[in-house]
Image (tube, helix red, strand yellow):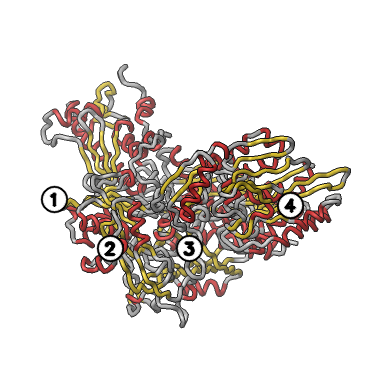
Amino acid sequence: MNEATPPKEERSAALSGLGTSRKRVEDARFTQGKGNYVDDIKMAGMLFGDFVRSPYAHARVKSINTEKALALPGVHAVLTAADLEPLGLHWMPTLAGDKQMVLADGKVLFQAQEVAFVVADDRYAAADGVAAVEVEYEELPVLVDPFKAEADDAPVLREDIADQKEGAHGPRRHPNHIFTWESGDRAATEAVLAEADVVAEEMIYYHRTHPCPLEPCGCVASMDKVNGKLTVWGTFQAPHAVRTVASLISGIAEHNIRIVSPDIGGGFGNKVGVYPGYVCSIVASIVTGVPVKWIEDRSDNLMATAFARDYWMKGRISATKDGKITGLHCHTTADHGAFDACADPTKFPAGFMNICTGSYDIPTAYLAVDGIYTNKAPGGVAYRCSFRVTEAAYFIERMIEILAIKLGMDAAELRVKNFIKKEQFPYQSALGWEYDSGDYHTGWDKALKAVGYEALRKEQAERVEAFKRGETRTLLGIGLSHFTEIVGAGPVKNCDILGLGMFDSCEIRIHPTGSAIARLGTISQGQGHATTFAQILASEIGIPAEDITLEEGDTDTAPYGLGTYGSRSTPVAGAAAAMAGRKIRAKAQMIAAYLLEVHDNDIEWDVDRFVVKGSPERFKTMKEIAFASYNQAIPGVEPGLEAVSYYDPPNMTYPFGSYICVMEIDVDTGTTEIRQVYALDDCGTRINPMIIEGQVHGGLTEALAISMGQEIAYDEQGNVTTGTLMDFFVPTAVETPNYQTDYTVTPSPHHPIGAKGVGESPNVGGVPAFSNAVHDAFRAFGLTQSHMPHDHWRIWKTAESLGLHD
Amino acid sequence: MVPGAFNYHRPDTVDGVIGLLGEWGDDARVIAGGHSLIPVMKQRLSDISHLIDLGGVGSLKGIGVDGGTVTIGAMTTQHELISSDALAAAAPIIREASLQIADPQVRYVGTIGGNVANGDPANDMPGLMQTLDATYHLAGPNGARTVAARDFYEAAYFTAREDDEILTAVSFAATGGGYAYEKQKRKIGDYATAAAGVLLSMDGGSCTAASVALTNLSDTPVYCEAAVDILVGSSVDDATISAAVKAAVDVSDPVADTRGPVDFKKYVAGVIVKKAIQSAKARA
């Protein structure tokens, strides 16, 4: 090493690469109000669209009169299904192989369903137009209970497919039945359960909720009739998929469609699907010849766009007398609402619900999921989780607790006894997954020690005695949760959406002066991709992260990818970034060898440069190589320094973690106070610890919301009773507890940098931790199961049913 | 969700307001802080073509404490109620209750007049005014008049105020003794699941005066006369408190909503009233 070469550590630190808590580069604009969201887009002559929505959950549309609306000043057009029908756009395909009305075609199937689209000068004129459209409805019987869907007197919701015996996912046994999906060995599982020492059985309901991103959905569609090009700026978590689907539906050639996702104010799965507002805006722009904007308001978002969860999971779990689990049986009734619009890989109509054996070595298992139509909004998206993984984790973590009660065992001990052991990885689960890596016991022990588990149990027992003596009216709950995620969808061999393979991509160009631009097929909605992906590349190619610009979301410039959801960005696009970086380095090695006048094999990579082996004073930095790549004629090497990688992951990644919540519960008021939340995550290689911590805090807060109060509730008539933020619980700083984060590192063996994804783990692990704390508080008084959300009145009802009130 | 078109007026005197109300009749509404009215307008639940902003009427603002009587102008914000040391000395229950209304952003704009005049049983101030036995000052085309807060509320959103009148001020006697305003809510910004205001004076181990009222436990705020009768003259021991709590809960008439079913609300009302009485007694 000559004097000019700083030490390795110093050069490495200057890159702000992997493992650095680099500050988020996005925050400069977000914290100054300089973000550029869809609603910030203003174009000359732009019109505004708004929906007439159904006040009824199930009704026939007898007539729609648009005359008065069209007579209002500023109203340009009112679209109904009759106007869309000649274009074949009055219905649209859903991501789950079903179809959905764009505008009410003869009937409405859920409250707030889109009935007509008013296009006007501005949103005020549009709202005036909406109020003036006259719709005559004939109310029909409403179905809100999925268990009544197949009754003799059940109303038939989907008359359009009432006679179809075969759906997108196999046979349908009733007009309100969508599919039955099975996984595992039914007969073997029944046999194990029949012979088991102990069987615990319970219905676990994971209620309907909603991702409720801060920014609702919206778009601006602009059809340029001169060049025939359609541009749509919108809140899209998967812009490339939207382009392909839009082309297939509309017949507009794919090269004539440009989809742009600008800054997005949170997605959490809500912005994966295609909504009627997008279709109507596009049609309206084609009809009027000017750009058309559509932006939801909060209630539209909560009531009409994709919900999450709503799984009724009937579980049976068997074990030996000493607590070794032998079998698991789960039958799920999945309430999909009026259209099956789940955003799942095609071959998985219930997502990855078959990860429901969780973190445990369960030799025999069986899962069946029945999808059912009801008069509720469509959706079924992964709200800050991989596809249905939160449901699966909640199910198994409740079943473990219930089994522990049945066995009279400590629930922590029962987990330890049944965890998949470190040496069993890669582990083949009974329901067909190959867990890539894990070390559950190490993290679990660390977690129990960190919270002082034994002392907590002692305190809890003392509290129960004090309660029985009448000295206190509060109970103490210790909520345990060990989750295993399955993220990074996914291998194209079994993961596609509407036939689009779920690979992802990165394209990188090194500029002559040694800075770079990288583009990916993903799109950040707050995850901080511009920060973290630059860190991956910095470590791979030796250019400081701050010298790398990241771009995503414009289909005219970014390479094709399936977007950002299901914690797939780091496992898939992050891998593509690393692989593209390695291609850059491979070419750089040839150039450096030429410049240093040695053979390619005689130089080696050293942080930010290639060095001649054994002669550290002879090197070429990546910056020097970049300049030479453009400006020096190198025999046999093309000019320039660029690379593209399309990464098809060989397997999913399996992040895991140990979460513990300690909660005080007032049995008289149903109020709770969270004393401690400890969250240990293992997401493999850690790219940016600060961003991981932020992700865990955010995910835990959403988990808190879901478990303790957040729901989309319907009354008997199918009216949404939680359609505003007064009733739909989003925690403020006051309700949010302090979080204690921790980690272990078990790298993914198949990912180029060993990373697994983390954004959704805290939601997956958090919900059972909070819910188990509530249940655990009442364990001494005989509670086995109560349903979320654990808001004040439901907790009070639990206490009441256990005879804890006067 | 945007409102329909409306005309905006900002008079600077009470007479100006009354004149506009007379001119536009049912088409006009006055707006104070707007927390109740603006959502109604955005949802187009009410057709208002003339909006009369009271924000320009200087005489409607301010807190006066004079000879044991507190007078608060209708346009005084909840933030100003909290910040006033004179008010905290004269009637500390106002600060305690105001701090439990929504969040600071709401309290910078929300007014006492709007809160009491709208007739929304979920608002905290109407219940508090029952506790304080306040007097409401109204002005209309026929001049000024007063109505006791305990006579003001007829049903949800129906009050003794005539359509051509506005509420200009509330007044009440400064309080002595103990006080408490207890409220259970689901989250910051929410209305009460149950709330109760209590005033209690003790002399020589005996209760000399008391007041108990409930918020969001019926379609109007509820003054609990029977509970007061039980407390006054007693030593406010546990048995008396239980009897008073039962009397208060008996006159509550909550409805089921997303905060919970009726049996839960009644039970929590009992817990809240008990806490408020105990807390007021401890401070008496």
The residue that mark 2 highlights is A79
Can you give x and y, in whole percent of width and height, for residue B12 in the image? 50, 38
Can you give x and y, in whole percent of width and height, for residue A550 in the image? 30, 39
Q: CA separation, marks 2 and 1? A: 25 Å
Q: Residues within 10 Å of mark 1 (few under 14, many from 20)?
A: few
| Residues behind callouts 2 and 1 on a single chain | yes
Q: CA separation, marks 2 and 3? A: 26 Å
What's the chain of the residue with tag 4?
Answer: B
Q: Nearer the viewer, residue B21 or A438?
A: B21
Q: Residue furthest top?
A: A3
Marks 4/3 in contact by CB < 8 Å: the verdict is: no
Identity of the residue drawn at 18% across and 31% down: A591
Q: Earlier in the sequence, mark 2 or mark 3?
A: 2
| Residues behind callouts 2 and 3 on a single chain | yes
Residue A574 can be seen in this image? no
Question: Does B192 sit left or right of A472 as displayed?
Answer: left
Q: Earlier in the sequence, mark 1 or mark 3?
A: 1
The residue that mark 3 highlights is A720
What's the chain of the residue with tag 1?
Answer: A
Q: Nearer the viewer, residue B159 or A120?
A: B159
Q: CA separation, marks 1 and 3? A: 44 Å
Q: Residues within 10 Å of mark 2 (few under 14, many from 20)?
A: some
Helix or strand or loop: what does disc 3 sit on?
loop
Disc assigned to residue B212:
4
Amino acid at dot 4: Val
